[in-house]
Amino acid sequence: MAFNLADYETVESRLEKFWKEYPDGRISTKIEQASDTRYIVSAELFKTEADAKSWATGLASESISDRGVNSTSALENAETSAIGRALANAGYAAKGKRASREEMNKVANYSPPGTRARAVEDVLRASFAEDKPTVWSIGDAVEAIPVNPKPQECKHGAMILKEGVAKTGKNYHGYVCSAAKPDQCEARWAKLTAAGSFFFPSDSEGGE
């Protein structure tokens, strides 16, 4: 699904409209959830400083990544997205263009077909194309997509699947080399999303 980033407003552009219309208003944000893997932030808009009840609200989540902008600024991005969402809910967005340019920029480039990253992008694009999206952030999409980790191979051929529940009570899923111990390749263990789906990091990055 092709789209033009120029068709989507930045959060800053929406803010300018809000402050012009309500110079005495205020915006309040709150961290609803913080963990080692993601942030969830809410935002509230008030028409005046004295208003006790918010006029519009927004909610956004961002997953903390090992690299890229979300390795250092996941919280800030979640707050920006939440504010943009609240502004969209208040009417500061064109019909069918509720996502902000910042959000759409995250999925501007396609990953290779068949990869986990591509599946996430496809869900996001389909969601943004609707007037009332059901998925707003990459973090939410990652958790929403069911994942079936593909079998792993090494230089010795097909690797052996190992899965179950560890003594700690945590589920595990991975592959070990079929060669004798002295010649075994390094085992490959899948990671677990908050939704309980396993994935191999190489799948999400489009590699083998």
Image (cartoon, rainbow, N blue to C red):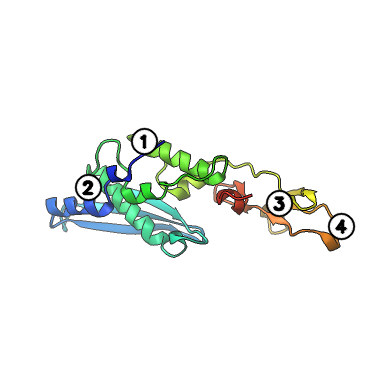
The residue labelled by disc 3 is 174
Nearer the observer: mark 4 or 3; the answer is: 4
Identify which amino acid the numbered label 2 is placed on: Trp
Nearer the observer: mark 2 or 1; the answer is: 1
The residue labelled by disc 4 is 180
Query: Which label belongs to residue 53?
Result: none
Percent coordinates x, y for residue 202 in the rendering: 61, 52
Identify which amino acid the numbered label 3 is placed on: Gly
At label 1, counting other C-alpha atoms closer than 10 Å, the crowd grade (few under 14, some 14-19, many 20 or more) is some
- Nearer to me, 41 or 201: 201
Tally the numbered discs. Answer: 4
Marks 2 and 1, Cα distance to the nearest angstrom? 25 Å
> Pointers 1 and 3 in contact (CB under 8 A)?
no
Marks 2 and 3, Cα distance to the nearest angstrom? 49 Å
Q: Earlier in the sequence, mark 1 or mark 3?
A: 1
**Under tag 3, what secondary structure?**
strand
At label 2, counting other C-alpha atoms closer than 10 Å, the crowd grade (few under 14, some 14-19, many 20 or more) is some
Marks 4 and 3, Cα distance to the nearest angstrom? 18 Å
Name the residue rendered at 60%, 46% in the picture.
Answer: 197
**Under tag 1, what secondary structure?**
loop
- Nearer to me, 62 or 204: 204
